[in-house]
């Protein structure tokens, strides 16, 4: 099987869906003439032209609103935010228009739109460009929120998102665009809301999503050297969440550690901890531990970034605590 970059997997997904369906188009800042801020849309303007690959002004509220209107009128927009930090400018259109259109119209209008772009820390970008809003959007009925962790998932989930009749928030990472992974040449689509058990284990359930999966897998490798077998679950989406896969795993391992890049209050990890204690309390042999970002605006200095974000050492220590194996 061939190996391609994360950005190439996203591009292939958009290209295939735009060739398949003429109602699909891409719009955002620098997506056309510049080939995308992160070169995700490289070459797409040449193939599809300026009517379907559309550069916009620096006006997220405006072009998000245009996208919502286009979706309500039968088109299938892909709206790229240069970073989801900038989506806050457009959040009224996302939450008060896109997410509510189907419900408020009594099912007369759907809103098949994808809002996509990078989320979270990308190195020395400081507080205003390093935030995670997965839990913000996941709190909104009417939205789906997808957070892929590798090129294979990115392509299959983006194709599913573009075909979905509901609005989808598709969150990537600037630090993952160059990541390489195996992606089939033949067409495939992954189900939104179905988690992936990336590594089987019996001692602890280790759960994450997005680029934090790198931390989870690295921690699992380190734990294996200590004789601890971690079952690693990639949620893939945080609305909907595949609770069933999570509960089955916890009933087997009797322990859970969740790794999440966002702040701790009202987080996805807090939701997972609640569901596990609600549905699998009698199976738990230790309290659930969450590894999140420190509850502060993310600093600029690399040393402080390292101290603020989840890392392998913190995850290993948490697993040692829940397995009562700490030195």
Image (cartoon, rainbow, N blue to C red):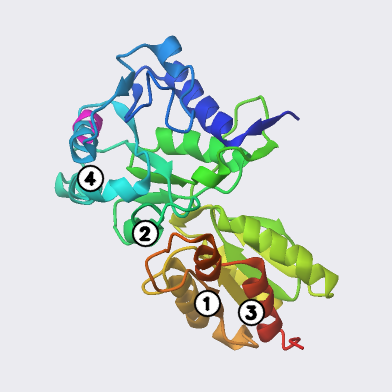
Residue sitting at 51 percent across and 40 percent down? 157
Structural distance between the alpha carbons of marks 4 and 3: 37 Å
Which residue position is annotated with label 1?
276
Would residue 40 be found to the left or right of residue 104 on screen?
A: right
Mark 3 residue crowding within 10 angstroms, few (<14) / some (14–19) / many (20+): many
Which tag is nearer the camera, tag 3 or tag 2?
Answer: 2
Which of these two is toward me, 227 or 274?
227
Residue 90's tag is: 4
With 273 as the anchor, is 213 left or right in this view? right
Kindly indicate the quadrant of the structure image that contains residue 281. Answer: bottom right
Q: Main secondary structure of the magenta part?
A: helix
- Residues at badges 3 and 2 in contact (C-beta under 8 Å)? no
Provide the residue span drawn in magenta. Answer: 67-71
User: Which of the two discs, 3 and 2, labels the residue nearer the N terminus?
Assistant: 2
Residue position for label 2:
127
Q: Secondary structure at mark 1?
A: helix
Q: Position of residue 186 (x, y in %)?
A: 65, 25
N-term-proximal mark, 4 vs 1: 4
Determine the secondary structure under disc 3. Answer: helix
First reached walking from the N terminus: tag 3 or tag 1: 1
The Cα–Cα distance between marks 3 and 2, rounded to whole angstroms, is 27 Å
Q: Which comes before the other along the chain, label 4 or label 3?
A: 4
Can you tell which of label 3 and label 1 is closer to the viewer? 3
> Which residue, given by chain and number where applicable, does mark 3 sit on?
318
Q: CA distance from mark 4 to mark 1?
A: 34 Å
Pinpoint residue 60: horizontal percent, then vertical percent. Answer: 24, 39
Q: Residue at x 41, y 15 (%)?
A: 45
x, y percentage for residue 128?
33, 55
Q: Is residue 1 magenta?
A: no
């Amino acid at each position: 099987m061939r190996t391609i970059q994360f950005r190439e997997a996203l591009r292939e997904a958009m290209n295939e869906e735009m060739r398949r369906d003429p109602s699909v188009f891409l719009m955002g800042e620098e997506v056309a003439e510049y080939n995308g801020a992160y070169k995700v849309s490289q070459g797409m303007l040449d193939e599809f032209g300026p009517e379907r690959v559309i550069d916009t002004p620096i006006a997220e509220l405006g072009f998000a609103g245009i996208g919502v209107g286009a979706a309500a009128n039968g088109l299938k927009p892909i709206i790229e935010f240069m970073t989801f930090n900038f989506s806050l400018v457009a959040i009224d259109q996302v939450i008060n228009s896109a997410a509510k259109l189907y419900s408020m119209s009594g099912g007369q209008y759907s809103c098949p739109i994808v809002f996509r772009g990078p989320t979270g820390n990308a190195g020395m970008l400081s507080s205003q460009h390093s935030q995670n809003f997965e839990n913000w959007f996941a709190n909104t009925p009417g939205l789906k929120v997808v957070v892929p962790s590798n090129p294979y998932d990115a392509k299959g989930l983006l194709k599913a998102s573009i075909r979905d009749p509901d609005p989808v928030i598709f969150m990537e990472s600037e630090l993952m665009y160059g990541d390489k992974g195996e992606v089939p040449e033949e067409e495939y689509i992954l189900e939104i809301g179905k988690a992936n058990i990336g590594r089987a284990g019996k001692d602890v359930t280790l759960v994450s999503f997005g680029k934090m999966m790198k931390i989870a897998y690295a921690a699992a490798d380190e734990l294996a050297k200590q004789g601890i077998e971690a079952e690693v679950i990639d949620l893939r989406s945080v609305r909907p969440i595949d609770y069933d896969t999570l509960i089955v795993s916890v009933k087997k391992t009797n322990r859970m550690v969740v790794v999440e890049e966002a702040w701790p209050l009202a987080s996805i990890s807090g939701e997972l901890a609640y569901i596990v204690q609600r549905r699998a309390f009698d199976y738990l042999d230790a309290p659930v531990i969450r590894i999140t970002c420190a509850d502060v605006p993310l600093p600029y200095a690399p040393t402080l970034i390292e101290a603020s974000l989840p890392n392998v050492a913190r995850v290993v220590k948490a697993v040692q605590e829940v397995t009562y194996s700490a030195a």
